[in-house]
Image (tube, rainbow, N blue to C red):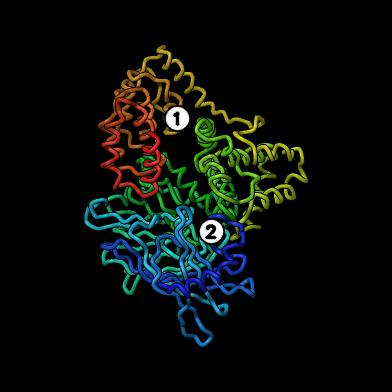
Amino acid sequence: MRTNTILRMTLCALFAHTAANVHADPLSYARYDQVRTTDLHLDLKADFARKTLTGYAELSLNWLDKSARSLVLDTRQLSIAKVQVLQPNGRWAAASYMLDKPDAEKGQALRIALSTQPEKVRIYYHTAPTAPALQWMTPQQTMSGKRPFMFSQSETIDARSWAPVQDTPAVRFTYSARIDAPQGLRVVMSAENDQKSTGAGGWKFKMPQPVPAYLLAIAIGELELRNLGPRTAVYAEPARIEAAAYELADTEKMVSAAESLYGPYRWGRYDMIVLPPSFPIGGMENPRMTFLTPTMIAGDRSLVDLIAHELAHSWSGNLVTNATWKHWWLNEGFTTYVTTRIVESIYGKEVAEMGLQLEQEELFASLKDIPVAKQALITRDPDGNPSQTYTDDQLAYPKGAWLLHTLEQRAGRDVFDPFLRGWFDQHAFQSATTEQFVAYLQKNLLDAHPEVMSKAELDEWLYGPAVPATAKHTVSPRLTALDAQRDAWLKGELPTANLDTKNWVAIEWMHFLNTIDGKATAQQMKELDQAFALGKSGNNEVAFRFYLASVKAGYSVREPLTAFLMNVGRKKFVLPLYTALLASPAEREWALAIYRKARPRYHPDTQTNVDKVLGKR
């Protein structure tokens, strides 16, 4: 809405007191202490030619402050056409609004001026082709080469780039949607998906459980589906659907295993979609429709711990959500712990133990690149500038899980399992803080078992750097035996051909490659490649670690690495590889040339992160 100078000055005066108030989430403009969204309805049309979603968002509101006369929403790159409010007579009337100047991190506040407290507000808008949450792909970027594709990634604060919402995990709402899409394309969302729908009259969705905005998700493309069990299915491009269905065949078992530990699955169905390779992360736990990278398809189900992780979020993260991103470890640390328990239940203690040791080793390896101030699970600082007060994203996963493993080991599972299940049950569909968890921990475990952990040690886990010295390291007998071979091989005492790898599983190869990274010679990497064809591995976790160790050793892997970098957009893989390549004088110019070709294929988030690496070189 374009406002003249006088109107804009009036609106600025009206909103001055709102802007001055401090609220809990520094990444959101929303005044959710005054009013909260209870339901969202989206009516949108996908335009692949313009790379936009166009339509309206209708928000149902619960007014907490009876004196409030404004609604503040989060937006990023949204073009607002008009705003309407629902009047008591059932008619929609225009409302005045303004957009703040854009902030590089937070986007723009949409400030709607109101004379009353309406039950519903509608915002008509369209997204930008550069919306950070949405990747629009040409037919040439898909497997069939026939039809385009689009998918979203809203976490952490990018939902605001495709819907005007209170974009904070502190606010949960139910939602529904009607989406128009080109004929021949299927639309799926993080909601109830009708498998029999044809899209006639628009694709319709309903999410009856309240979710935070970051769990809003949509994908549109040439998709087929396969049912895996009575409440599980997978969607994927036609050329990938059979491989996906094979890889994910154990999903129903995982749901049952998680339920036996932590109570009923409360989201109806657990479906998944395998996205194109540019999806920037391993998986996104969007409820009812987990989004997955195709890099987890190894052909032998060796990377399904990723599914266990995303499923675990159905309890930790989706059911009980961090109240702000400062408390990120409550989502990811808890989920990483639950993942190990699900893997153990399905695949046995030996496999879970190897995975846990690998997880802990990679935590320690990462510390050298993480500033000490970022090594705490959470800071004591009040919520302010996230770049100053938030922990390192990746550290929250293994360190948070290690804290929970420590509590479990000392209390025993007979005590700890009911304790953790109680946390999920008592805080279901709520947003929580670290302080709430500490209070729950004290009341429900430590008061009865003070020997489990002192307050000083708990504070060290939460607020201290690295990992406390009291932490018990997991030692897998299988990995210990492997280490003996590795040491002899590195010293040249054991020929490559004599490495006994016939019974190694993917975790063992990952551990082996991690621990020779920066130590093996170019000749040793060449011999490994010739003996085990690691450069052609169908397991992307193994291939990535082989390429990384090879680059650091000076062994040229340009041919397979070119294909990898051109076809895999997962940030976890491409960022360390470009970092290593740019650090090598022999590979730098080649890497820059590859990136120029590959960059258009990557998700905007991956592009931004690699661009930062380039800027440092």
Taking depth in this image into account, of 461 and 256 the one nearest to the observer is 461
Q: Earlier in the sequence, mark 1 or mark 2?
A: 2
User: Which residue reaches farthest bottom?
Assistant: 89
Give the position of the C terminus as an image quadrant.
top left
- The CA distance from mark 1 to mark 2 is 43 Å
Quadrant that contains the N terminus: bottom left
**What numbered label is drawn on residue 553?**
none
Q: Position of residue 195 (x, y in %)?
A: 37, 64
Q: Return the x and y of residue 463 as percentages of the image width and height.
A: 65, 40
Whether residue 226 is visible: no
Question: Are there few (<14), some (14-19), or many (20+) residues within 10 Å of tag 1?
Answer: many
Tag count in the figure? 2
| Kind of residue sitting beneath label 1 | Glu
Mark 2, residues whose alpha carbon is within 10 Å: few (<14), some, or many (≥20)? many
Please state if 159 lies on the left or on the right of 54 as rendered.
right
Q: Secondary structure at mark 1?
A: helix
Viewer-closest of 276 and 497: 276
Residue at figure coordinates x 65%, y 53% from the top left: 423
Foreground mark, 1 or 2, reads 2
Name the foreground residue: 412 vs 608.
608
Q: Position of residue 502 (x, y in %)?
A: 39, 26
Residue lying furthest front: 6
Does residue 45 sit above or below 439 in this rendering? below
From this viewpoint, is residue 526 visible? yes
Residue at the spot 31% in from the left edge and 56% down from the top edge:
136
As helix, strand or loop, the secondary structure at mark 2 comes to loop
Determine whether 483 is above or below 140 in the image: above
Which residue is painted at 59% across and 69% down in the image? 35
Q: Tell me the amino acid under the disc marked 2.
A: Ser
Q: Please provide percent x and percent y for residue 83.
A: 44, 75
Residue beneath disc 2: 28
User: Which residue corresponds to mark 1?
Assistant: 508
